[in-house]
Image (cartoon, rainbow, N blue to C red):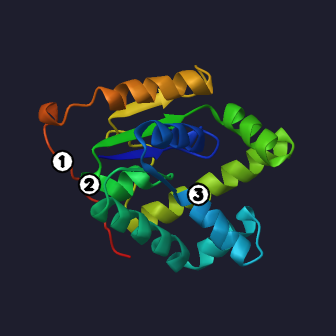
Amino acid sequence: MLVTISGPPGSGKSTVASALADHLDYDHISGGDIFRELADDRGLTLEEFNELAEEDPQIDKDLDRQLRETARERDDVVLESRLSGWMAGEYADIKIWLDAPLSVRARRIAEREEKTPATARAETEKREDSESARYADYYGIDFDDLTIYDLSVNTARWGPDAVTDIVLYAVDNYEPSNDEGPAPIENVDYEF
């Protein structure tokens, strides 16, 4: 089975994806980790690397191609990134969206990255606006369209353990025989 965990920065994607991968004994592949490693390799902050990606579309496209290929070629994976549901498309068995209000996500990011909440919020808004515009331009993706997801959870309503339990319940109770089949995502241009 292939499960995707998507959502904006600070929504709890990594926490839930890691717990789910451990529970299922699957590999956990994080697009965010790959993006951070690429930034570190170039000696750039995440914000600086994101700005570079605005100028060089190949940065995003290389990562996205890797996510798409992973989805097509592998099973027993939890694929986590903001775009994983879109990139996995018809190859995913279950696509999950996690979200929380920006103020909550900014506070989480501030704590994790030892920043002020105001700084985290400003950087997150800038990053989200940039990524939304780039992915709409590259692939025709509308991040406000959540119809591609099988489950959407507001992670501000429950703690990390409860959110993980909700996701685990959904995944554990997935019956392939009841699944109506692959759901290709229409109007997305997978040109890398």
Q: Is residue 119 left or right of residue 55?
A: right
Q: CA distance from mark 2 to mark 3?
A: 20 Å
Q: Which residue is mark 3?
A: 32
* Residue 185 visible in the displayed image: no
Tell me the number on the disc at residue 182: 1
Observer able to see residue 69: yes
Which of 69 and 117 lies nearest the eye of the viewer?
69
Q: Secondary structure at mark 3?
A: helix
Q: Are marks 1 and 2 in contact (CB under 8 Å)?
A: yes
What residue would you read off at disc 2? 91
- In the displayed orientation, state which residue is furthest to the front: 25
- Residue 37's place in the image compared with 1, above or below, is below
Depth order, front residue of 180/99: 180
- Three-letter residue code for mark 2: Tyr
**Please, what secondary structure does the residue beneath circle 1 have?**
loop
| First along the sequence among labels 1 and 2 | 2
Whichever of labels 1 and 3 marks the residue nearer the N terminus, that label is 3
Instruction: Determine which of the numbered discs, if any, sits on residue 65 in the image.
Output: none
Residue at 66% in and 36% down: 102
The amino acid type, in three-letter code, at marker 3 is: Gly
Q: How many marks?
A: 3
Q: Position of residue 183 (x, y in %)?
A: 20, 47
